[in-house]
Image: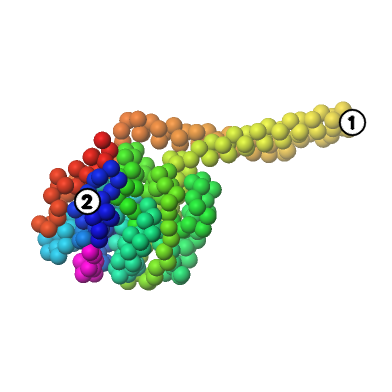
Amino acid sequence: MTEKERTASKGATYPLALSIVIPVYNGARSIGELVGALEELAIEGGHEIVLVNDGSPDDSSQVCRALVDSAQVPITLVNLARNGEHNAVMAGLHHASGAHVITMDDDPQNPPEEVERLLAFAQETGKDVIYTYYDEKQHAAWRNLGSRFSNWVADFVLEKPEGLYLSSFRCMSAFIVNEITRYEGPFPYIDGLILQVTHNIGRLMVRHLPRAAGRSNYTLRRLLRLWMSMFVNFSVMPLRISTITGFALSGLGALGGAMAIAEALLYSPPAGWASLMAAVLLLSGVQLVILGIVGEYLGRLYLTANRKPQSVIREVRRSELSPTAEARPAARKKERA
């Protein structure tokens, strides 16, 4: 790796070529195999692994500590006190020191050799971010459907480049990491932050393997929370939809009122209790939905103003091979100055 490639904007230098950030949740059975394979990679300029234990209820913390103690490459373990995938990724990015940063899941569904391809592609193209996509995803059908819906929502809300698949297996330059870690709010959404900073984005097709152990940690509830963060934290589109809906229903109400007056003048209509109740229920429901959207914005604003923490770090543990703690934030602070 050249000195130019190891130097970020404004002259900030980074001690390693690559940082690999992995949020770990219920990953005790798979993280050891993944880290072992990543340690064997031959990355010119050196690489490190940043493990973020995302409040796992299993013994992931003990497994990760053992991996730090026996590390063959620099490994940092960040133990969080509470769960949240994108919050965990943000915590890992704050402890990354590489000129490029790759994020990936804690199971070996993304073959470690694809990490080398992804880094080389990012270095060759000079893109700020490289997202991966798959010829065939080895997820459950409902998970694939949820991913497609998330990407459709992102097309609508985030104005992302057409055809871009927002994968958690991505490579970012240090410049992008420095920019998105400026965000201090309690509801981070990594892809939303990236798209706010840059559209200089590339794509690379990689292999996707079946899950070897355990099951996906994504649930319908977590997907709903992700969609809500996408909608409310990174777009005013819901408020615009509420406004348009209000105007549309007002127009329908005016039209219905005119029709009711005309009917009363020209005919002898029967009592309209059922239609009246249907209209009241419809309009009341729409009003409550709109109030709920506005309330969600206000609630998140309230929590942000009261400095709800983005993450709570219980422990940071580094292997003896890791760069010094002072070297990690120094470049980022220098670049922000």
Tell me where residue 200 appears, x and y as whole percent: 43, 51
The quadrant in which the C terminus is found is top left
Which label belongs to residue 14? 2
Tell me where residue 266 appears, x and y as whole percent: 89, 31
How did the renderer colour the structure? Answer: rainbow
Residue type, mark 1 in image: Leu
Q: Residue at x 26, y 50 (%)?
A: 7
Label 2, secondary structure: give it. Answer: loop
Looking at the image, which is closer to me, 181 or 262?
181
Q: Residue at x 49, y 55 (%)?
A: 151
Q: Where is 283 relative to 320, above or below?
A: above
Residue type, mark 2 in image: Tyr
From where the camera sits, is residue 213 visible? no
Tell me where residue 15 appears, x and y as whole percent: 19, 53
Q: Which residue is mark 1?
A: 266
Q: Residue at x 30, y 70 (%)?
A: 113
Q: Mark 2 and mark 1 in contact (Cβ < 8 Å)? A: no
The quadrant in which the N terminus is found is bottom left
Tell me the crowding category of disc 1: few under 14, some 14 to 19, or many 20 or more residues within 10 angstroms, Cα based. Answer: few
Q: Which residues are magenta?
A: 36-44
Tell me where residue 52 appears, x and y as whole percent: 25, 53
Horizontal placement of 165 versus 99: left or right? Answer: right
Q: Residue at x 39, y 70 (%)?
A: 207
Asked where in the image residue 283 lies, by quadrant, the reply is top right
Q: Where is 237 relative to 107, above or below?
A: above
Asked where in the image residue 188 lies, by quadrant, the reply is top left
Q: Earlier in the sequence, mark 1 or mark 2?
A: 2
Label 1, secondary structure: give it. Answer: helix
